[in-house]
Image (cartoon, helix red, strand yellow):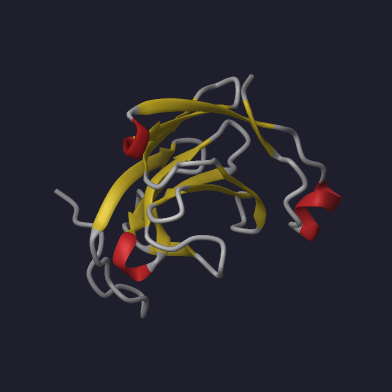
Amino acid sequence: TRIFGGNVSGIKGLKFPWELAINNKEKLLLVCDAKNNRVAIFDTVTGEVVKEIKGGGHFKSPRSVDVDNEGRIVIGEEGEGKIVVFDEEGRFLDEWKGEGVDFACSLAVSSEGKVYVGDQSNNRVIILKIEEVNEEEAEIGVGKGVVQKEV
């Protein structure tokens, strides 16, 4: 048995952990730490926090998280219902805010890069597509249409 969380490595402990995702390639556990407004990332071997992605104006109260084949981290948030995408280093890439979406309660990323979002406030599932982004766009992090709604 292994326990993740608590006050480890000088980083505050989890407060209202919500949804989990695994990055099998990098052996990481991602935890939506809703009340700390972050996604905490643990090494699955050591149990140590290796990184955290804080909202920084892009999200607050994360409720859902997954990782695509490229290692990009997709986060759904409560309140504004935004879907936010970060690269594997935690740099902001883009966000999508759908009309009438208040609570992106769950999401899953397919191997084709489609993001299926459970929109609890409207009893529906929305399908988004993550487009490729080059290194320069990732460095800028300006959000130029990386996430598009499936038609």
Q: Position of residue 45 (x, y in %)?
A: 35, 50
Q: Is residue 84 left or right of residue 124?
A: right
The outermost residue toward the bottom is 10
Quadrant in the rendering for residue 42: bottom left
Q: Position of residue 118 (x, y in %)?
A: 38, 32
101 or 132: which is nearer to us? 101
Quick check: 117 above or below 21? Answer: above
The outermost residue toward the front is 100
Residue visible at 40% across and 60% down in the picture = 40
Quadrant in the rendering for residue 107: top left
Quick check: 20 above or below 16? Answer: above
Quick check: 92 above or below 70? Answer: below
Q: Is residue 92 left or right of residue 79?
A: right
The outermost residue toward the right is 136
8 or 60: which is nearer to us? 60
Q: Position of residue 85 (x, y in %)?
A: 59, 47
Residue visible at 71% across and 40% down in the picture = 146
Residue visible at 42% across and 26% down in the picture = 125
Q: Is residue 62 left or right of residue 72?
A: left
Q: In the picture, which quadrant includes the C terminus?
A: top right
Query: Total number of numbered labels?
Result: 0
56 or 99: which is nearer to us? 99
Residue visible at 33% across and 44% down in the picture = 20
